[in-house]
Amino acid sequence: MLDKQLADKEYICGDYSIADIATYPWVAIYEFQGLTLDNHSNLKRWVEMLQKRPAVQRGMAVPA
């Protein structure tokens, strides 16, 4: 569902928003959940793009 939503958008709602901020942590742990994004190219692109954002990196480091 999310892969389809991202098919023609850079971010979930078009522009970077609270939807991306709230959803990212749940998707980012896909490997921990035993999942892969290999068949979800749009979702994979989105995850990789958000991983590069400095604020996302700082947020994901809490409570390290």
Image (cartoon, rainbow, N blue to C red):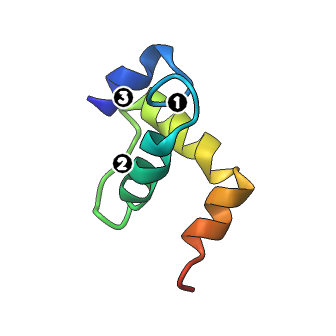
User: Label 1: how many residues lie within 10 Å, few (<14), some (14-19) or many (20+)?
Assistant: some
Q: Are marks 1 and 2 in contact (CB under 8 Å)?
A: no
| Residue 11 marker | 1
Q: Residue furthest top?
A: 8
Q: Is residue 5 above or below residue 47?
A: above
The part of the image, by quadrant, that contains residue 39 is top left
> Badge 3 is on which residue?
3
Identity, as a three-letter code, of the amino acid under mark 3:
Asp
Percent position of residue 59, x then y: 59, 67
SS at mark 3 in the image? helix
| Residue 36 marker | 2
Q: Left or right: where does residue 62 sit relative to residue 36? A: right
Q: Quadrant of the N terminus?
A: top left
The part of the image, by quadrant, that contains residue 5 is top left
Q: Earlier in the sequence, mark 3 or mark 2?
A: 3
User: Label 2: how many residues lie within 10 Å, few (<14), some (14-19) or many (20+)?
Assistant: few
Identity, as a three-letter code, of the amino acid under mark 1:
Tyr
Q: Nearer the viewer, mark 3 or mark 2?
A: 3
Cα separation, mark 3 vs mark 2, equals 13 Å
Q: Are marks 3 and 2 in contact (CB under 8 Å)?
A: no
The part of the image, by quadrant, that contains residue 10 is top right
Percent position of residue 50, x then y: 60, 46
Q: Residue at x 44, y 30 (%)?
A: 12
Q: Are marks 3 and 1 in contact (CB under 8 Å)?
A: no
Percent position of residue 7, x then y: 44, 18
